[in-house]
């Protein structure tokens, strides 16, 4: 498969970079051995393959920094559809988790990765927490196998727990906690098998206990952090998704959740947390001071009624911003186009909610200045690469990996756009994907994924869903 070619006549280019560099006039991009060799008005070289991108726009391929791929088989569960986080956990992911076998897990992973690819996502960080003592299949191996088969960059955030919440303790053996020694031993195994520390890595491993306040003791968390840093891997988990985190941290540890993380050595530029919805100003300042990142998951936070993370304030404080789709069980549209569309809208809504009338001291009418499309593209691409430590994915510029999404905006949703570059983010939906490149390799071509029969995958999913539902009777 060639990784050297010329993409010609691109209508618009979003680079994922800051400020004036957020766009490039192009109209051509040369890819040489999987790396961007030139951008500008370029003539084909003798014998050079040419991809005609007439009427297409180019983005960096999306970087999804937080997912739970197994939940791709748990969408739209009536028992959890109107529940907030804690009752939803009991109603859906914990209730069904024990029913996953190797075949169902692999199917869920494949569905989730295909859904992401079709939105233009080339890098996926999955926070997998399906582990328990004596487990008869290797979820980590399946994740890497499926991602490799599809040609994606994959980061395994190895979840798990050494202790459980009460709602988990009442559920089947598949929810039994691991020992700390067992968890660290598996981390060591995974790092040796899969972890590539290079800035253009196709495979990474991350230390990611499921939820610091609930999944391990403070001393165990410090041990995990020390182990990870000695091994040269990053740290990830959930934090401050709802007020429940605030109540737990205050009640058990007499501090805020972010202060708790600091006490456990879980802040720093090698750490990022999913959600961070409920924060006070001192926590925002501490996250910024330490360079701790966020995986912003606006659709899941909206679906569960958790709130809207203060992304504007976090970025102003110095927090690295990235975007994650979270699991499909709390986000029935787990793709990066719908996620970035939501991020664009929700930050504006959050800012607008703060507006008050002038007679009451207000100074602005609305929140449309809270997030630009260029901001959102940056958060979802180079922002994600930054929190994952993938330094060779620093946007569409010379010398960087050729991770490129080419969209053709031929759906009526995008007709009439004065600025086509805005289309995917402002329009949402699913634009036609002319091509998706990862390290210069086409993993999607003409809106199709080589080797994937979507109709057959849909039939398999429907049959598996029926079996899953029948098993509860």
Image (cartoon, grey):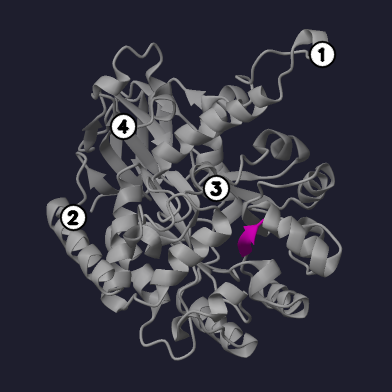
* Residue nearest the observer in this picture, 122 or 325: 325
State the CA–CA distance, disc 2 to disc 4. Answer: 24 Å
Q: Is residue 165 above or below residue 68?
A: below
Up/down of 412 relative to 62, above or below: above
Q: Where residue 402 sits in the image (x, y, percent)?
A: 40, 44
Residue identified by numbered label 4: 407
Q: CA distance from mark 4 to mark 1?
A: 46 Å
Disc assigned to residue 385: none
- Distance (Cα) linking label 2 and label 3: 30 Å
Q: Earlier in the sequence, mark 1 or mark 3?
A: 1
Left or right position of 51 against 325: left
- Which quadrant holds the C terminus? bottom left
Please give the name of the residue rendered at 54% of the width and 71% of the height, measured from the top-left corner: 159
As measured in the structure, the alpha-carbon distance from the residue carrying label 1 to the one carrying label 3 is: 40 Å
Where's residue 271, x and y in %?
A: 67, 59
Sequence-wise, the earlier of marks 1 and 2 is 1
Classify mark 2: residues with Cα within 10 Å, few (<14), some (14-19) or many (20+): few
User: Of the residues tagged 1 and 2, which is closer to the observer?
Assistant: 1
């Amino acid at each position: 498969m060639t990784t050297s070619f010329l993409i010609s006549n691109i209508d618009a280019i979003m680079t994922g970079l800051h400020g004036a560099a957020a766009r490039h006039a192009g109209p051509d991009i040369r890819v040489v051995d999987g790396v961007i060799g030139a951008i500008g008005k370029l003539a084909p070289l003798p014998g050079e393959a040419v991809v005609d991108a007439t009427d297409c726009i180019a983005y960096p391929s999306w970087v999804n920094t937080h997912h739970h791929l197994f939940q791709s088989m748990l969408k739209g569960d009536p028992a959890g559809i109107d529940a907030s986080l804690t009752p939803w956990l009991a109603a859906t992911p914990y209730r069904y988790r024990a029913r996953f076998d190797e075949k169902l897990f692999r199917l869920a992973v494949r569905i989730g990765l295909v859904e992401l690819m079709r939105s233009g996502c080339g890098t996926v960080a999955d926070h997998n927490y399906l582990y328990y003592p004596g487990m008869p299949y290797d979820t980590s191996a399946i994740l890497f196998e499926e991602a490799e088969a599809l040609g994606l960059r994959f980061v395994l955030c190895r979840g798990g727990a050494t202790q459980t919440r009460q709602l988990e303790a009442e559920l089947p053996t598949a929810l039994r906690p691991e020992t700390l020694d067992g968890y660290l031993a598996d981390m060591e195994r995974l790092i040796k098998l899969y972890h590539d520390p290079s800035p253009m890595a196709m495979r990474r491993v991350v230390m990611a206990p499921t939820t610091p306040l609930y999944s391990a003791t403070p001393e165990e968390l410090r041990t995990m952090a020390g182990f990870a840093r000695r091994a040269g891997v990053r740290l990830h988990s959930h934090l401050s998704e709802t007020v429940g985190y605030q109540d737990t941290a205050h009640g058990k540890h007499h501090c805020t959740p972010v202060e708790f993380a600091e006490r456990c050595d879980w802040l720093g530029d090698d750490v990022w947390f999913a959600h961070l919805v409920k924060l006070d100003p001192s926590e925002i300042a501490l996250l910024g001071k330490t360079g701790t990142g966020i995986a912003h998951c606006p659709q899941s936070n909206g679906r569960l009624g958790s709130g809207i993370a203060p992304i504007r304030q976090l970025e102003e404080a110095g927090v690295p911003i990235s975007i994650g789709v979270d699991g499909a069980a709390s986000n029935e549209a787990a793709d990066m186009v719908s996620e970035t569309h939501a991020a664009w809208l929700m930050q504006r809504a959050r800012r607008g909610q703060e507006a008050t009338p002038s007679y009451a001291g207000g100074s602005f009418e609305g929140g449309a200045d809270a997030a630009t499309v260029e901001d959102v593209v940056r958060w979802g691409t180079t922002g994600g690469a930054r929190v994952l430590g993938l330094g060779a994915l620093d946007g569409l510029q010379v010398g960087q990996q050729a991770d490129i999404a080419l969209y053709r905006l031929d759906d009526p949703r995008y007709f009439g756009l004065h600025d086509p570059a805005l289309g995917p983010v402002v329009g949402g939906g699913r634009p036609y994907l002319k091509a998706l490149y990862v390290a210069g390799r086409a993993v999607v071509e003409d809106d199709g994924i080589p080797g994937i029969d979507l109709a057959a995958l849909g039939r398999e999913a429907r049959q598996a869903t029926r079996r899953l539902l029948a098993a509860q009777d």
